[in-house]
Image: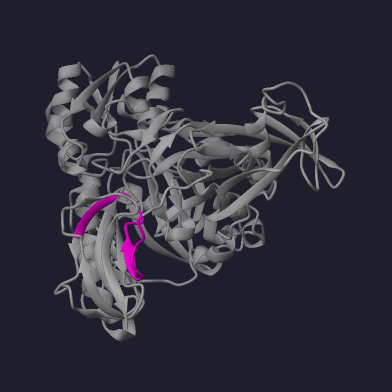
């Protein structure tokens, strides 16, 4: 009987495992890097152990330190979560060798399936050894791990070497394993997967299918269960293949077998020998707690002969601190508030007031809706996200809402190229035009009367306040009138510091206003209050390349130096932020006149990296 579990992970998955353990009466131990010293997962666990350092290679990827932490804290089992060491057979063996219970598959099964190259060989599928023009496009892929790390689509042979190097670097940073391989890239396919759960008594459950086709950078954004639109024959085929793969390696515990579906053909991709980020949609449909089942299996309990029946439909959206309109650039800063209304499930590793840093994945939360039908689940999830209060860094919330309401998605006609086709329209700014006025009126609350007395029989001069909204400057104008605050074109029904009621074209609207310094949120619209008399600011020369995010310069293009001639779009340097590498390219064709960035340098948003003078 397991009495204490160390969770060898961080963020929302660590919090999620702790929640199930607490419900089962199991004591929990968290581990944390220095950057996570006050993270939510350390606060919800019964105790926490420090892993000195901040980089994953020094902390969450140090299996020896984690085993030592488990023993020091008196844990008798280890749950790996997902990512980091969750698919590392050496770590699983080290846990067992230390006399601890490993809540995961046998190391032999991990070795057989966790490496995508070995898994394909086991099933008779060979990776591409020599890539030619005829093979394009191809996909460069990390052999270990998942989550879109170490994956690159290559459409031009000349780009292959650079993308191989970038994929290796990402894979080392995320998984501690730089092995990569190349396989054909199937255009227009659907990403379909099967959840399996196996015990030590020979029972293997196939808990239905999931569709995870909406992806950016090969990382899933929206997932659902069951996968819609599969024929009965194809559904039965992928479930049977998943069970066969699990039995072939003597699998135990929770795992996922992934396929790329094109037409009526299912192409095997990989088997993830761990829990998946999207496991909540399966839990909702089948009414099971997969973490609880993992623990029961690790304790030697047998599964029932058949899994529980599926009921209804579930959809999950991953809320990221990122800007989809700026090449998905990750964002950092204080998360002042996260509140999602409605009957939805929220899995998160953050609480109000927590900071989102630069060291780890930018996912803030997963929001899951379950309903009797797919249409009802989509409607419920879209409405909850649309009304959510998310105060802090820029997020992909608007993209999620628009994606869920897009006709291709609602009609279940999606594939992995969805965002390639629709991203510009999905990221088009659509701020509320009345938000600046509402912010200004809320700010003016309490100052509607002169400090020399009440209203005076003198026409009031318009007051103005300026705000930055969706990258553009907006001016709000109002007056102190006989009946209070007034504005042209609308009727001010009521104005307080935190709520404003306006009547617009005969319809009354409510605006909730929240301030954090010069940052103002009006309902779901974010604004920045601008000073009345702005200070002069430094101007950057034309062609300046500024850091789009905080991160580390990991590489500068070979031979790049002041005086080098470059073409528009040429890669100049690479930044690493939140475990992903981001390519910085020349904005124009010209000559490099300044190069400020050097490998290993830490940069902040807006810092000058280089200057290209146009020719």
Q: Nearer the viewer, residue 50 or 176?
A: 50
Q: Would residue 243 be seen by someone viewing this image from the given angle?
A: yes
Q: Is residue 488 above or below residue 599?
A: above
Q: Position of residue 108 (x, y in %)?
A: 20, 45
The colour scheme applied to this rendered structure is one colour
Q: Would residue 309 be seen by someone viewing this image from the given angle?
A: no
Magenta segment: does it hold 435?
no
Image quadrant assignment for residue 128? bottom left
Q: Nearer the viewer, residue 325 or 485?
A: 485
Q: Is residue 456 above or below residue 202?
A: above
Magenta segment: does it hold 550?
yes
Q: Nearer the viewer, residue 387 or 281?
A: 387
The residue located at (65%, 32%) in the rendering is 444
Q: Is residue 12 above or below residue 534?
A: above
Q: Horizontal placement of 16 versus 522: left or right?
A: left
The residue located at (31%, 72%) in the rendering is 586
Image quadrant assignment for residue 274? top left
Image quadrant assignment for residue 98? top left
Q: Position of residue 9 (x, y in %)?
A: 29, 34
The residue located at (84%, 42%) in the rendering is 507
Report the quarter where the N terminus lies.
top left
Q: Position of residue 144 (x, y in %)?
A: 25, 53
Residue that lies at the very extreme toward the right in this rendered image: 506
Report the quarter where the C terminus lies.
bottom left
The stretch of residues the image draws in magenta is 538-554
Q: Horizontal placement of 351 versus 147: left or right?
A: right
How many marks overall? 0
């Amino acid at each position: 009987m397991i009495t204490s579990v160390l969770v060898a992970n961080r963020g929302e998955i660590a919090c999620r495992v702790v929640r199930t353990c607490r419900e089962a009466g199991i004591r929990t131990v968290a581990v944390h890097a220095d950057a996570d010293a006050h993270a939510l997962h350390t606060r919800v666990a019964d105790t926490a152990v420090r892993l000195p350092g901040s980089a994953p290679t020094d902390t969450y990827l140090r299996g020896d330190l984690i085993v030592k932490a488990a023993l020091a804290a008196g844990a008798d089992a280890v749950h790996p979560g997902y990512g980091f060491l969750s698919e590392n057979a050496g770590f699983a063996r080290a846990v067992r060798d230390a006399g601890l219970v490993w809540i995961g598959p046998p190391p032999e099964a991990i070795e057989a399936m966790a490496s995508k190259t070995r898994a394909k060989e086991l099933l008779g599928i060979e990776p591409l050894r020599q890539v030619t023009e005829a093979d394009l496009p191809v996909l460069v892929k990390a052999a270990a791990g998942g989550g879109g790390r170490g994956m690159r689509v290559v459409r031009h042979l000349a780009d292959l070497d650079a993308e191989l190097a970038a994929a290796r670097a990402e894979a080392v940073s995320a998984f501690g394993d730089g092995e990569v391989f190349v396989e054909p890239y199937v255009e227009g396919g659907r990403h379909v997967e099967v959840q399996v759960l196996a015990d030590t008594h020979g029972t293997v459950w196939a808990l239905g299918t999931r569709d995870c086709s909406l992806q950016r950078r090969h990382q899933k954004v929206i997932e659902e269960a069951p996968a819609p639109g599969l024929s009965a024959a194809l559904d039965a085929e992928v479930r049977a293949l998943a069970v066969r793969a699990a039995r072939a390696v003597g699998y135990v515990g929770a795992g996922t077998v992934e396929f790329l579906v094109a037409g009526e053909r299912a192409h095997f991709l990989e088997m993830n020998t761990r829990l998946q980020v999207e496991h909540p949609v399966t839990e909702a449909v089948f009414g099971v707690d997969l973490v609880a089942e993992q623990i029961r299996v690790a304790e030697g309990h047998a599964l029932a002969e058949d899994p529980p029946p599926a009921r209804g439909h579930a959809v999950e959206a991953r809320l990221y601190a990122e800007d989809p309109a700026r090449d998905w650039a990750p964002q950092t800063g204080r998360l002042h508030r996260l509140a999602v209304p409605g009957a939805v499930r929220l899995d998160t590793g953050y609480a109000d007031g927590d900071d989102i840093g630069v060291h780890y994945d930018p996912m803030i939360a997963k929001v899951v809706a379950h309903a009797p039908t797919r249409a009802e689940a989509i409607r419920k999830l879209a409405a909850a996200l649309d009304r959510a209060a998310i105060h802090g860094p820029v997020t992909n919330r608007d993209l999620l809402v628009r994606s869920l309401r897009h006709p291709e998605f609602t009609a279940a006609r999606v594939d992995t190229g969805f965002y390639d086709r629709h991203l510009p329209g999905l990221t088009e700014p659509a701020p509320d035009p009345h938000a600046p006025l509402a912010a200004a009126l809320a700010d003016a609350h309490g100052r509607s009367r002169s400090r020399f007395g009440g209203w005076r029989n003198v026409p009031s001069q318009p007051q103005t306040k300026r705000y930055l909204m969706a990258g553009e400057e907006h001016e709000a104008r109002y007056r102190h009138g006989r009946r209070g605050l007034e504005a042209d074109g609308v009727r001010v029904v009521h104005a307080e510091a935190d709520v404003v009621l306006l009547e617009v074209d005969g319809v009354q609207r409510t605006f909730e206003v929240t301030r954090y310094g010069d940052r103002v949120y009006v309902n779901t619209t974010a604004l920045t209050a601008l000073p009345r008399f702005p200070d002069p600011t430094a101007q950057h020369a034309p062609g300046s390349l500024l850091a789009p995010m905080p991160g580390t310069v990991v590489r500068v293009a070979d031979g790049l130096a002041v005086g080098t001639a470059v073409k528009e779009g040429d890669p100049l340097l690479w930044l690493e932020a939140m475990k992903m590498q981001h390519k910085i390219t020349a904005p124009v064709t010209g000559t490099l006149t300044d190069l400020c960035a050097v490998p290993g340098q830490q940069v902040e948003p807006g810092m000058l990296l280089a200057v290209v003078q146009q020719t």
